[in-house]
Image: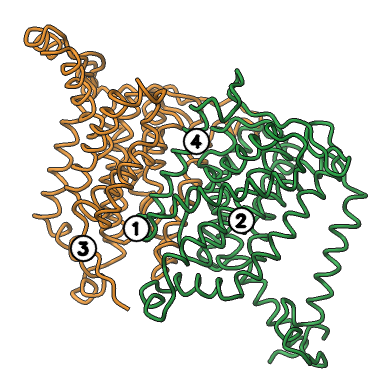
Chain colours: A green, B orange
Amino acid sequence: MFYREAGDFHTTYTSDSQTFPIKFDRYRYYVILVIAFLVVPFIINDYWANAILLPFLIYAIAAIGLNILTGYCGQVSLGTGGFMAVGAYACYKLMTAFPDVSMFIHVILAGAITAVVGVLFGLPSLRIKGFYLAVATLAAQFFLLWLFNKVPWFYNYSASGQINAPEREVFGILITGASAPAWATYLFCLIFCFASAIVARNLTRGTVGRKWMAIRDMDIAAEIIGVNPLRAKLSAFAVSSFFVGISGALFFSIYLGAVEVGEAFSIQKSFLVLFMVIVGGLGSIFGSFAGAAFLVLLPVALKVLGVDMLGWPTDIVAHFQLVIVGALIIFFLIVEPHGLAQLWRLAKEKLRLWPFPH
Amino acid sequence: MSDQFVFAMEVTLNGLMAGVLYALVALGFVLIYKASGIFNFAQGVMALFAAMTLVGIMNGQVPFSHLINATFGTDLHDFGWHLPALLAILLTVGVMVLLAWGVQRFVFSHLVGQEPIILFMATIGLAYFLEGLADLMWGSEIKTLNVCLFGESGCLPQGINETIDAVTYEWFGYGFFIDNLDITATIVAAVLVAALIAFSQYTKQGRALRAVADDHQAALSVGISLNFIWILVWSLAGFVALVAGIMWGAKSGVQFSLSLIALKALPVLMLGGFTSIPGAIVGGLIIGVGEKLFEFAIGAPFLGGATENWFAYVLALVFLVFRPQGLFGEKIIERV
């Protein structure tokens, strides 16, 4: 009844090609933004920030990044954990080397450094395709982790081999370290998440995005109609790694505060982000958010259900979590291979017609 | 003869042995990939699952005892018997066949005709599921696996091989350290490969399997049941996983890290090609020797060690840049 194009007249090309052409969609989007920016910071507490909101925002950025590479450009990557580690270590080195520079600049620079590394490891994608490439990206994962473990320069020669985020302020407000207020860390991540989503959304519906999708659908055909595979693939690797690097930097500096590279950025992380993209929906920015929310909330929900309500020991709940995550992924692939985003699309199609069946 | 050279020879020999074990895991991948086009990431977890099931059955553990105890407040642990290894292995094979049927029935029969990437994701989901299931069933603590086939004799041998030690000492003035278990694993792997090749060449089912690997639709049209073949292939892969699980489990205990051997097998596959059984073996040997020698010559002295984690991947990556279909893989022909 509310959700339809009728009566919403677009008189300019700009308004016709905007992200949310339907009025209801647009207002819903504004309402979410207002809640996220103006309501949540006032009611947030430490538990909500650390257990749900921060990981959600940070993983959403990583999922957007991987979605650009895998969902839009069709290059499967299992090196996300390694690239997040690059972002984290780049951010750490920058934070300790230039204490007076704003964290915004550090995080963006960390993303840029990761983009360079990503392009480097993306080079084989010009020769290697499909599964061979997926396995090849594991080289990045293992090599990068080994590098950060073995070269003391990366962790400033600290005895434990860990990196710890020093306390840094933005506009006079503490955002890293244990005593940073929840609302500040939340807002900092939210700004990056919001910006990433907008940039990714507009990249993917522009020329670059169309080239990526052409490569994904069939790279030889794309090459014949004039898409340069070198530039398309490497730009996808660069943009994707940029976002993944930002998320790694935030993951380390804002969320965890202290990182041991083998634990925080192991191959499990690569799989987790890949699952988010799959469950959310390949080739959809909304899907990245949905997938991140789903896989961040699932363990929390299971823990509440298993430990707090049924009183099981935590290790059983952890095992159940594996079983359920695995089963859910298979379930999603069988029932809806295009993920939550496709369900959302179907729901919207139905809504446009509601209350009439046709 | 210089010491360095002798050491390098020992390292090479050990690398070959390790390579055989990698090849053993890679073999399971190749079997499934050839017959169904599924890149089975769960192979390593299947090895873990098989080894844990074997230990559990041998020790007469009650499946899910931890969970049952937590839910009903009972105190169950084991049935109080010890099964002979041979019987336990047969039972475990039964479990793996059941698993193969379940995988085919509940997962892949619903995913026929999907893109390969979707199938790959499904196997990652399967890997998570199996890992959680194995932990729930048998508990996640580290178990020792000691398989003795005929009563007290015929156990898997462990420790240094005295004969080789003595002979090489006579030749080079330095005794090589070669684990008996690795030698056994090499023999078992050789027998297994020979048996697989004989099976696929000389039996009816084996021929049907190769037909399916060549062309699904043509195989269907001459009356081969795809469903049966796929269950058969998953059972075979389960059996290979069991063998790999026994070997690796006897070497380093049955624990979570066993499932990570899948990650060791991936570069082997890249090198050898996803579709070639000889490729898996040759690739395994190259990777085994390559990473041990690299660690010995460059990794440990100059790079701070632990290069084995990534060297195999980088080697495979560099190799693939020059030969994208692997050593023995079918030539990739792309058309619009």
Q: CA distance from mark 2 to mark 3?
A: 34 Å
Q: Amino acid at mark 1?
A: Ile
Please indicate whether residue A135 sits to the left or right of residue B190 in the image.
Answer: right
Q: Give the image quarter of residue A254.
A: top right
User: For this rendering, which residue is in front, B136 or A347?
Assistant: A347
Please give the residue where the numbered disc 4 appears in the rendered image: A145
Q: What chain does mark 2 sit on?
A: A
Residue A250 percent coordinates (x, y): 69, 44
Image quadrant occupied by the N terminus of chain B: top left
4 or 1: tag closer to the N-terminus: 1
Please give the residue where the numbered disc 3 appears in the rendered image: B331
Residue B272 percent coordinates (x, y): 23, 48
Q: CA distance from mark 3 to mark 1?
A: 13 Å
Whether labels 4 and 1 share one chain: yes
Is the Cβ of the residue at disc 4 closer than 8 Å to that at disc 2?
no
In the picture, the disc for residue A128 is: 1
Q: What chain does mark 3 sit on?
A: B
Image quadrant occupied by the C terminus of chain B: bottom left
Q: Residue at x 39, y 68 (%)?
A: B112
Q: Residue at x 19, y 49 (%)?
A: B277
Please give the residue where the numbered disc 2 appears in the rendered image: A63
User: For this rendering, which residue is in front, B279 or A191?
Assistant: A191
Please indicate whether residue A269 sits to the left or right of residue B285 in the image.
Answer: right
Label 2: element kind:
helix
In the picture, the disc for residue A227 is: none
Label 4: element kind:
helix
Q: Amino acid at mark 4?
A: Leu
Q: Which dot, 3 or 4, sits closer to the camera?
A: 4
Q: CA distance from mark 4 to mark 2?
A: 20 Å
Q: Residue at x 61, y 21 (%)?
A: A158
Does residue A193 sit above or below B57 in this rendering?
below
